[in-house]
Image (spheres, grey):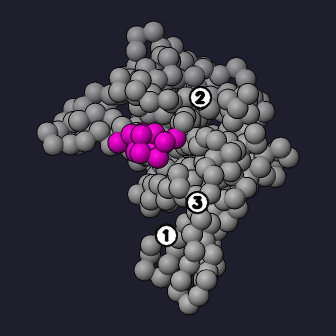
């Protein structure tokens, strides 16, 4: 049984990297419409798996990034999974008349989220809300019949409800550290910018103190000592960049010699620019297709797919 990889539109950059760097990767890209585009003039998406017949009885891994357009991206992902759930051969037999034949389905379908959307909506914060992150998992697994879901540095990895789903969460810390070491940053101290990052990454660091509705200050844990050190601030997501800027300023105030940023997901472009403008260097993976991404995770994706398929 072969493993066939299908990147959605938001993950085409990963699919191209896999195709270029790993000869064993069997990558199949989605098709385009008669206008040679992925969208119709009214904005609706076009979804086609041109080589659907090649997937009969095979293992299929769909790679998807939940940004930069989370809602549009999910529609594209769901449509791709729908094609795989009920593959059909179409044959034109006359003007506007077609003959349809059901095809044999893939042996299994898995989804690899390089960035999982809605992961920060992992609780019901207000009455009448849904847990949006769980809703995405529920659709993918229970409606579309996906066998396993892979994520990278999932923001809601500690949620109790996640145990109900076949999820494998992978850390990008190894590839980020390797990129830093390649640049000569070996003797560094890794710190977290807030309590959430401390819990997710098992690091010491800072905690936020909200003074009022508009002002937030940060303080260091008593055991934090960064005087004369090169500090690497590790976090999973850049959104507005405000937390990261406050962290950089605090570590310099505590005597750090230099401060670098290490981030898995560059969610907001403005936040990325803010961090770049305040840190000596930003190490950012390409889980989301951003121009400033300088750490490639395609090897992490490929190795995970290979190991899990054995």
Mark 1 falls on what kind of element?
Answer: loop
Q: How crowded is mark 1: few (under 14 residues within 10 Å), some or many (20 or more)?
A: some
Side (left or right) of 290 relative to 212: right
Residue at x 77% of width, y 49% of height: 26
Q: Residue furthest top?
A: 223
- Region in magenta: 135-146
Q: Answer with mark 2 or mark 1, whichever residue precedes in sequence.
A: 1
Between 131 and 81, the one nearer to me in the picture? 81
Depicted 146 relative to depicted 273: above or below: above
Q: Answer with mark 3 or mark 2, whichever residue precedes in sequence.
A: 3
Image quadrant assignment for residue 196:
top left
Q: How crowded is mark 2: few (under 14 residues within 10 Å), some or many (20 or more)?
A: some
Q: Is the magenta stretch mostly helix, strand or loop?
A: helix
| Quadrant holding the C terminus | top right
Whole-angstrom CA distance, mark 1 to mark 3, is 23 Å
Residue 201 shown in magenta: no
Q: Residue furthest bottom?
A: 95
Side (left or right) of 241 relative to 134: right
Contact, mark 1 vs mark 3 (Cβ under 8 Å): no
Side (left or right) of 172 relative to 145: right
């Amino acid at each position: 049984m072969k493993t066939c990889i299908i990147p959605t539109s938001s993950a085409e950059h990963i699919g191209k990297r896999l195709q270029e760097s790993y000869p064993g990767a069997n990558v199949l890209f989605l098709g385009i419409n008669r206008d040679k585009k992925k969208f119709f003039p009214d904005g609706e998406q076009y979804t086609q798996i041109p080589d659907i017949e090649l997937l009969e009885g095979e293992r299929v891994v769909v790679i998807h990034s939940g940004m930069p357009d989370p809602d549009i991206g999910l529609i594209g992902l769901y449509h791709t999974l729908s094609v795989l759930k009920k593959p059909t051969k179409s044959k034109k037999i006359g003007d506007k008349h077609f003959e349809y034949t059901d095809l044999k389905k893939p042996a299994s379908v898995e989804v690899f989220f390089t960035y999982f959307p809605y992961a920060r909506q992992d609780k019901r914060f207000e009455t009448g809300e849904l847990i949006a992150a769980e809703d995405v998992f529920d659709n993918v697994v229970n409606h579309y019949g996906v066998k396993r879901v892979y994520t990278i540095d999932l923001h809601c990895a500690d949620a109790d409800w996640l145990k109900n789903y076949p999820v494998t969460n992978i850390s990008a810390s190894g590839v980020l550290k390797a990129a830093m070491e390649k640049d000569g940053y070996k003797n560094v101290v890794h710190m977290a910018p807030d309590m959430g990052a401390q819990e997710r990454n098992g690091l010491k660091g800072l905690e936020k103190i909200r003074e009022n509705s508009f002002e937030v200050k940060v303080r260091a844990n008593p055991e934090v000592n960064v005087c004369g050190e090169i500090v690497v601030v590790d976090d999973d997501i850049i959104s507005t960049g405000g937390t990261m800027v406050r962290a950089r300023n605090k570590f310099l105030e505590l005597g750090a010699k230099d401060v670098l940023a290490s981030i898995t997901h560059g969610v907001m472009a403005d936040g990325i620019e803010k961090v770049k403008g305040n840190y000596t260097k930003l190490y950012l993976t390409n889980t989301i297709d951003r121009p400033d991404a300088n750490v490639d995770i395609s090897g992490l994706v490929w190795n995970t797919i290979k190991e899990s398929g054995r």
